[in-house]
Amino acid sequence: MKHLLSFVAISFLFACKNDQDKNTIEDQVPILDLTQFVNPMIGTSKMGHVFPGATAPFGMVQLSPQTNFETLHNSDGSYNTETYAYCAGYQYRDSTIIGFSHTNFSGTGHSDLGDFLVMPTIGNLVLDPLQTPEGGKGFYSTFSHEKEIASPGYYKVDLDSYGITAELTSSERVGFHQYTFPSTEEAHIILDMVYNVYHHENKNVWTFIRVENDSTITGYRQTKGWARDRKVFFAAIFSKPFKSYGHKKYDQIKYDGFYRRFHQEENFPEMAGHDLRAYFNFDTQDGEQIKLKFALSSVSSAGAMKNLDAEIPHWDFNKTREETKAKWNRELSKIEIQTITPEDKITFYTALYHTNLSPIIYEDVDGQYRGLDQNIHASDGFTNYTIFSLWDTYRALHPLYNITQPQRNNDMIKSMLAHQEQSVHHMLPIWSHYANENWCMIGYHATSVIADAMVKNVGDFDKKQALKASVTTANVDYFEGIGDYKTYQFVPDDKSHSSVSKTLEYAYNDWCIAQMARVVSDQKTEKEFAARSQYYKNVYDASIGFMRPKLSNGEFKKDFDPMDTHGQGFIEGNAWNYGLYVPQDLDEMVRMMGGKERFAQHLDSLFTMEIADKYIEKHEDITRDGIIGNYVHGNEPGHHIPYLYNWTGHPEKTQARVRMILDSMYDATVEGLCGNDDAGQMSAWYIFSSLGFYPVTPGTPFYALGSPKLEMAVLHLENGNTLTIKANNQSSDNVYVKKISLNGTPVQGLSISHHDLMRGGELIFEMSSTP
Amino acid sequence: MKHLLSFVAISFLFACKNDQDKNTIEDQVPILDLTQFVNPMIGTSKMGHVFPGATAPFGMVQLSPQTNFETLHNSDGSYNTETYAYCAGYQYRDSTIIGFSHTNFSGTGHSDLGDFLVMPTIGNLVLDPLQTPEGGKGFYSTFSHEKEIASPGYYKVDLDSYGITAELTSSERVGFHQYTFPSTEEAHIILDMVYNVYHHENKNVWTFIRVENDSTITGYRQTKGWARDRKVFFAAIFSKPFKSYGHKKYDQIKYDGFYRRFHQEENFPEMAGHDLRAYFNFDTQDGEQIKLKFALSSVSSAGAMKNLDAEIPHWDFNKTREETKAKWNRELSKIEIQTITPEDKITFYTALYHTNLSPIIYEDVDGQYRGLDQNIHASDGFTNYTIFSLWDTYRALHPLYNITQPQRNNDMIKSMLAHQEQSVHHMLPIWSHYANENWCMIGYHATSVIADAMVKNVGDFDKKQALKASVTTANVDYFEGIGDYKTYQFVPDDKSHSSVSKTLEYAYNDWCIAQMARVVSDQKTEKEFAARSQYYKNVYDASIGFMRPKLSNGEFKKDFDPMDTHGQGFIEGNAWNYGLYVPQDLDEMVRMMGGKERFAQHLDSLFTMEIADKYIEKHEDITRDGIIGNYVHGNEPGHHIPYLYNWTGHPEKTQARVRMILDSMYDATVEGLCGNDDAGQMSAWYIFSSLGFYPVTPGTPFYALGSPKLEMAVLHLENGNTLTIKANNQSSDNVYVKKISLNGTPVQGLSISHHDLMRGGELIFEMSSTP
């Protein structure tokens, strides 16, 4: 952290470089406010799946408005599960808010969370969010974007239905609400324990609230959704004692008669049930502010109270807001930029912001957290993280962390190793989700994150343990066809779904394990996994030039359609795009697929072909917005493809495509993300590509060179060095790179080394309008 | 514990007294085996509600067979809630066993528990307990009592359907199973996470099993039944690796698609759901024993594993059996007896056994336990207990502990004070149930337990804290009419059910608080609560001579039926019997009710009247078996009544009635309990009355004298003293007491002081056949 502060301190953009000793000024706060260039609203429309609410960098609390209105219920009152648009609880198109919840995913392709919805209201108490049983209005409020402010760590909105102004800020583990009420004897703050992002029957396993005194409440919720057994505890304090309180249960659970005999809905300090909404009543003067500090913990309500006491012991809302803003400026100031347009700066810093939202810190202030075995563990010498959406994030997000967040990436890897130790499957995380493995998507890409860190010399995690954990993971035979993959040297399509995707990803992951083995000089393991990394060849059908599903009898599956994304051995992709997934062996893949020219033609076709609607509508993750020809930027498996021209002798085509994608797939509007941000992966692609290079093969210390979009960038590295990237003669038309030099030496070839960049200095691109 | 051992060592019955120094022989094991006189089968028929399985004294594990067959399902396959007969999971009349569960109440009047049902089977795997969906036989087995053995800490039965012999023993926190199989390649051990004593829809909130390795499993279950939010964790080890395993889910819960994609029923080491049954498969040789150690914890599976490692680190079944037997002999040897008949000895020691089954230890070996706030607490300098069925047990069980278990009773009071500190209601326990308050029955009788210990000088708990906790409890106005009771000086029947019973009990509890206040010299509190203790008078209707429900307007409720147990202001009783509940002011009550002769006549009528069937059938707790006239021995509120003749100048009638009850309401058969043992209260009544005295008014240090049933008893007191009780000229006809002397001095009056008894010596009753 000391280093981070010093980076910030010396980062007064280009106008105010200084040469002061780094260590003497480390406690200075940055003068520069880069949060002004972040617009959390970007991507909140359509499929971006990001949230506009208040959170600290990597914070455990994501306190954000829920507009999940239109799709929360079907017209018959039942819950509607078609809530894919609401993965982060918010859609810009909506004009109503039903409350503010404390947990939200950023950009995921599936839904969960939304814990502890809080909503202030006035007037007659209404405890139904949408409609009362009598057909009256629910407790939601209308709002307008004109009366809405979102910036890093701060959110404000006028709740027009009630004349209440809501403000939110957050520390890492504590959400801080500030509600400005009109004068009324009927002010209410509702705590809705029912609400889920993606609610469905029986999702709430149990909810529990205790009224500890006239202003303090504690409790927990257990849900089984995407995470099968997820417990979140809370402790919350109101700034003013409530005058009365109560609750209503919506579930049909019959309590035992003995219990029922002594159960009341009002002023009874213990409330529990599946589907429970509580309310707290106040008198307010006009303009009176009621504040609420709401802390989370995965351990216990006592843990949550500890977090609350440690992080926000006061009632100064603005102090917390400013502290969190300062934390954001520290993170954002790691990369200072100069852009062609003002909008580009906003797009860039918002992308950088999005790369700092998850993984999230997953431990109490004392290091305790609930592990996969439901036992309480304590992180030992590291900060524990969760939300590893690894099929997405190993591609560019974790490689980006090896530049911007090496300490956190080290802690994330240690968190993955702890996960592996706790896993009864003895597996590294696939998708780590609040002490649950939700098994989302395929491959064992934690191996990529680990290998990438190892070859880039990032972190002090135990490399031999990491290799062992990876080898163990790669040998869990019952996991998604691994046993068959080992037996047949490919995943047979008659034994497992997504057989080609799995074969390709396992082969890449195995190559990653071989890289780790090389680093720790374990030649036997290196050889074994290097051999496995070649299995991708076994699903290539040279007769048609495509990767193709193969059966256990050794024959290719008949009736093959390389355009179809369903039932053709691929998941969320097709043979045309996902079939190019051999990042570990690109020269050989290009040779295998007919050589450089033919491969370049394949890419040309991919980017320019027209695809029929029937191939589009099938998958929720792929919409026209994120597609260029048959290249899908709105989803992950092709994110390396624009850079593959480099392997065909046509780097100029990479440069043009990359700039075209940067310009067309991202902007500074609410629709600025062409698909799910996927926990930061889409944004990390933007950051890398804007800087002029991309980690096509995580697990090597090399980046493929592309075409920078920025005019200048100054990277304040955690090792104390500064890397300045300049794009001379930069313009929106000058997308081609004439030459590149690093510290005055021309860069040969089409890649650049991580280690060279980490030494700092100047990386200069000479841009041109012609190839 | 040192003292206990020495008591045992010197207790070789009357035949082998010795004068060895107590401290030099304390590590000797008792020569005397008193467990031979305990028959856990007594009371397992009809309404005794006791279990025959294996448990250590006050053990957290009660590992016992479940014959809950006939009533588990209705004929349509739905669960039958008419399972009142199965509060302890077992009914002697049954001929089938569906498995062995690890937790069972002893003698309660309501149902819960039954956690972690284990059943060994062979042949085709069947996972349905009663009937397969195809109509085949479930996994239950037939058995016969001829092949069944039950003794303290040990249970054995032949499972005739499978040719398997099952043996069970237990330490405090670990159940130990030993199954002897025939030769088969299809041996199974089923772990049924669905089963509950009193199962009903949605009772299981969540169940979770992890297969840690080829012989170790962990997990937990959360239920909402009588206890609303109850979590029990386990860790278990099989003595032999299973060759395969799997599970089946019976619930209709839809998991998320992503999870389902990677979920299999066989050999998948993580299982979770509402209604889950797992199986573990083995090959066995003929006569091969598979053992299973199954540890519980309220904290975590890690806690359970700690308990397992600490208590049973080996695989020697007989060693644990012998250790637990020795623990039982230590407890039983505190009272050595000589009886008129051999059966009496069995009845007595089985009753003594029943008084040592609950409250149960509720903490891990390291002192940690889950509290009422769902946070983890640690006992500090005491052992934490739960299962306080206080409306029952304050009467005689806790007073008995002040003689036989003062150290444990001290710890129980400390547990109650910890409960009060954790309670969001700030109340002492009403019915403490595994970190839940189940609110069963009325009054705040923890105050009686505390007052009784204080006036008897038992324990080192903080007396001022205890008083404060009691006063706080007595002022929780929203609890069951306390606010109204304070306002009106009685509980108005139009505002609260059971108004007369509540008024009487609150008045007694308030008197208990006054006694505590006197002990700590808090005169203000003593005066306040002494005044409240007189409120019983406000529900007495002198015009009819009965306690009677009164309305908030000050008028008695019309249409009063003093025989009816429903809707007449009483709960589980009527005005005839429950209306005599003024233990704190008996002389005044007798005076108020017309004087000694009239009161004696009331008692005579009570014991001899014939009551119509319509008054009997209404309450499940009261059957003809436990009734003498209108006196109900099978339930608690009249347990003091036989002794009330002492207050009328007719002690001979007390003596006759007490002996009559001892002889007619208890015996050494499976029907030996005339009603629910009620967590030991019925048995404690037997112990006291057999010894010749009874605590009519807990909170005074005096016992009412009755008629001993024993010939001789030697009480080895925890203070090192020995009290010998002799009944000279004892016989089944000589029920009258001619005179009594203590250490040679005649006892005057009809009571005897606790303090005098605790000094030890000889208490001699001279018996006679005439009054």
Image (tube, coloured by chain):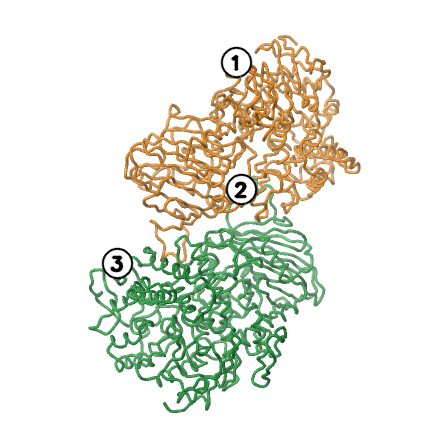
Chain colours: A green, B orange
- Tag 1–tag 2 contact (CB < 8 Å): no
Q: Position of residue A757 (x, y in %)?
A: 45, 79
Residue topped by disc 3: A487
Inspect the image, locate mark 1, and give the three-letter code of the amino acid beneath it.
Thr
Taking B122 as reference, is B496 left or right? right
Residue topped by disc 2: B364
Assign a secondary structure to mark 1. loop
Query: Foreground mark, 1 or 2?
Result: 2
Q: Position of residue A372 (x, y in %)?
A: 46, 54
Residue sitting at x 57%, y 82%: A13
Between residues A128 and A714, which one lies in front from this camera angle? A714
> How much space separates mark 1 and mark 2, taking CA atoms?
42 Å
> How much space separates mark 1 and mark 3, taking CA atoms?
76 Å
Q: Chain of mark 2?
A: B
Q: Position of residue B227 (x, y in %)?
A: 54, 42
Packing grade of label 1 (10 A; few <14, some 14-19, many >=20) is few
- Tag 1–tag 3 contact (CB < 8 Å): no
Q: Earlier in the sequence, mark 1 or mark 2?
A: 1
Inspect the image, locate mark 2, and give the three-letter code of the amino acid beneath it.
Asp
Assign a secondary structure to mark 2. loop
Residue topped by disc 1: B341
